[in-house]
Image: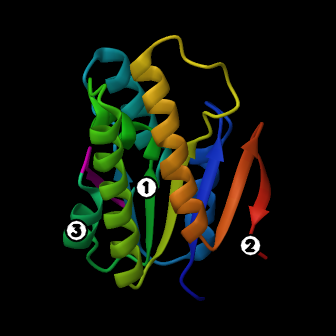
Amino acid sequence: MAKQIILLLGGARSGKSHYAQQLAMELGGKALFVATGEALDEEMQARIAEHKKDRPQNWRTLEIPTGIGNGIEKGIGDAGVVIIDCLTLLISNLLHDETDYPEAEKRVTSEINELIAIMDRLDASFIIVSNEVGMGLVPDNKLGRIYRDLLGKANQLLASHATEVYLMVACLPVQVKGQ
């Protein structure tokens, strides 16, 4: 099967992660799961534990909050499929409390361009999970608006590079790019 780059977009609890795992199993071969979430509190620790239980035991996991391109390149091993779950938390990790838009944009753009370059170099398929945040309310604070704008920009960069893009709606994939 030809190398693929698949972007899965959708709202919270829309079935993105479940569908990403299903696609990875269909693509076959060894899988590498790249988790960007950090267990900074008890609630997040419980979420991460639940996600780990849902994954096949034979998948390797890398926990990489930022710098995922280099982390994947160093840790890919013999994996033929890489799942990145999720871009939403990666962008949050990059921003922290950054409210200087040009600086935040530079940081996010650099991270995504590095990821794209790594995806192009590696002989593996990629499945990237991200939230679609452009359909909701305008955030009431500057950091929230910067986050929404930069996640939207990251999604656009990856969508333009992806071979397939799906919008998840109630656990149903709606293909918006590809065959």
Of labels 1 and 3, earlier in sequence is 3
Q: Residues within 10 Å of mark 2 (few under 14, many from 20)?
A: few
The residue sitting at 60% across, 33% down in the picture is 133
Establish if 110 lies above or below 163.
Answer: above
Of labels 2 and 3, earlier in sequence is 3
Of labels 1 and 2, earlier in sequence is 1
Furthest residue to the front? 102
Which residue does the numbered mark 1 point to in the structure image? 84
Q: Give the structural element (helix, strand or loop) at label 1.
A: strand
Q: Three-letter amino acid code at disc 2?
A: Gly
Q: Residues within 10 Å of mark 1 (few under 14, many from 20)?
A: many
Establish if 69 lies above or below 134.
Answer: below
Tag of residue 178: 2
Q: Give the structural element (helix, strand or loop) at label 3.
A: helix
The residue sitting at 36% across, 44% down in the picture is 105
Report, in whole angstroms, how far the alpha carbon at label 1 lies from the one at label 3: 13 Å
Q: Disc 2, disc 3: CB below 8 Å?
A: no
Task: List x then y, in percent, for residue 164.
Answer: 67, 68
Tag of residue 75: 3
In the image, taking residue 32 as reference, residue 71 lies left or right, namely left
Task: List x then y, in percent, for residue 116.
Answer: 40, 69
